[in-house]
Amino acid sequence: MKPWQTLSSNALVEDRWIRLTADRCLLPDGKVIEPYYVLHERDWVHVFAQDDDGSVLVVRQFRYAAAALCVELPGGVIDEGESPLTAAKRELLEETGYAASEWISVGRMYANPARQTNSVHIYMARGLTQLTSQTLDESEDIEFEFASIAKVHEMIEHNQFSQALHVASFYRSLRALERGGA
Amino acid sequence: MKPWQTLSSNALVEDRWIRLTADRCLLPDGKVIEPYYVLHERDWVHVFAQDDDGSVLVVRQFRYAAAALCVELPGGVIDEGESPLTAAKRELLEETGYAASEWISVGRMYANPARQTNSVHIYMARGLTQLTSQTLDESEDIEFEFASIAKVHEMIEHNQFSQALHVASFYRSLRALERGGA
């Protein structure tokens, strides 16, 4: 199974928020597909942060495109030149005010590899200390709380923890815990 | 925590493949954000189909945006006017040639609610029968195989089953199985 080749790539929208291209692609069997739209995104990080009782830090915010209030893990976009781990520490601090003494990489996944270029990097954080209050961007309004693992399962099943990428990161972190990999 | 209001929405790209708008949004605190980009997508379905031994049908295809060969669950876009269950049956049949006698809804999640409007609907399928061969779109080149649950876990951890949305659907299906909800 061979990769497709990019014959050309034309930027339709390009600013600090988004880069969308319309590509002309050559398939292995010789067919040409056009336009194939690609969203060029920076990588993201998700943080599975547990307190000493095993409860998980979750954040709640309004998500405009789906018009939904979503409970998620802390996380966000990795800045240019920033390592995934540094971004994970920064996002946890900005969204919750917490720092952690122990950081463990759980792995990475593609966000949506048919349409988007980027990956999600997952970290577990432990040894939490509240250092500061939140430091949010102007468009951000984020509440945070600690929730037990059982409560997060329940929120997933009741469509409150409803962001698929975060559901994946939550379960991958649980699996890493079960496997003793962390 | 109140929703944002849409003051205006301007379609930048709109065809059979994609609809991207640049919105002007009023936040609850009175701030106005513009542009806020929204990808208007149809809902998707994922199928967790198990044979009588508990092995899971997985598909393997090249995903252009991430330039990666990805193992995933069967699934795809719900057509206009089609129910999620009908789409799940159609996608399983098209991608693998299999039909199932038992279908169970596992739930739904938002694909990426900050940027995209759509949800992913998850179904478990059992009582599999191979009815036909694959029926693929011209741009599709899909291999399928049965993999044990342990093998899928391994493929997730080794970044082969690497599509975050499908990772979420796999774990949600396992959780439903463990809970005896299916």
Image (spheres, coloured by chain):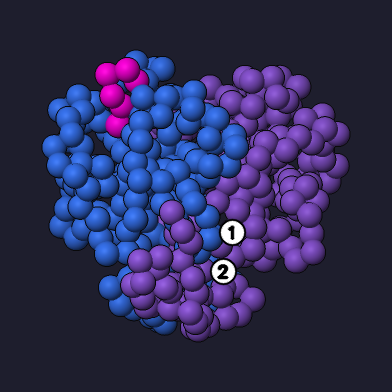
Chain colours: A purple, B blue
Q: Magenta stretch?
A: B49-54
Amino acid on which the number 2 mark rests in the picture: His
- Furthest-front residue in view? A29
Amino acid on which the number 1 mark rests in the picture: Asn
Q: Residue at x 35, y 36 (%)?
A: B145
From this view, report whether residue A30 is shown above or below residue B151.
below
Q: Chain of mark 2?
A: A
CA separation, marks 2 and 1?
A: 7 Å
Would you say the residues marked 2 and 1 are in contact, meaning their CB atoms lie under 8 Å apart?
Answer: yes
The answer to whether residue A65 shows anywhere in this view is no
Q: Residues within 10 Å of mark 1 (few under 14, many from 20)?
A: some
Q: Position of residue A133 (x, y in %)?
A: 79, 47
Q: Residue at x 41, y 17 (%)?
A: B178
Q: Position of residue B119 (x, y in %)?
A: 36, 50
Q: Position of residue A93 (x, y in %)?
A: 78, 47
Question: In front here: A87 or A33?
Answer: A33
Report which quarter residue A27 is drawn in: bottom left
What secondary structure predominates along the stretch shown in magenta? loop
Residue underneath mark 1: A118
Q: Position of residue A149 (x, y in %)?
A: 58, 24
The answer to whether A33 appears left or right of A160 in the picture is: left
- Discs 2 and 1 lie in a common subunit: yes
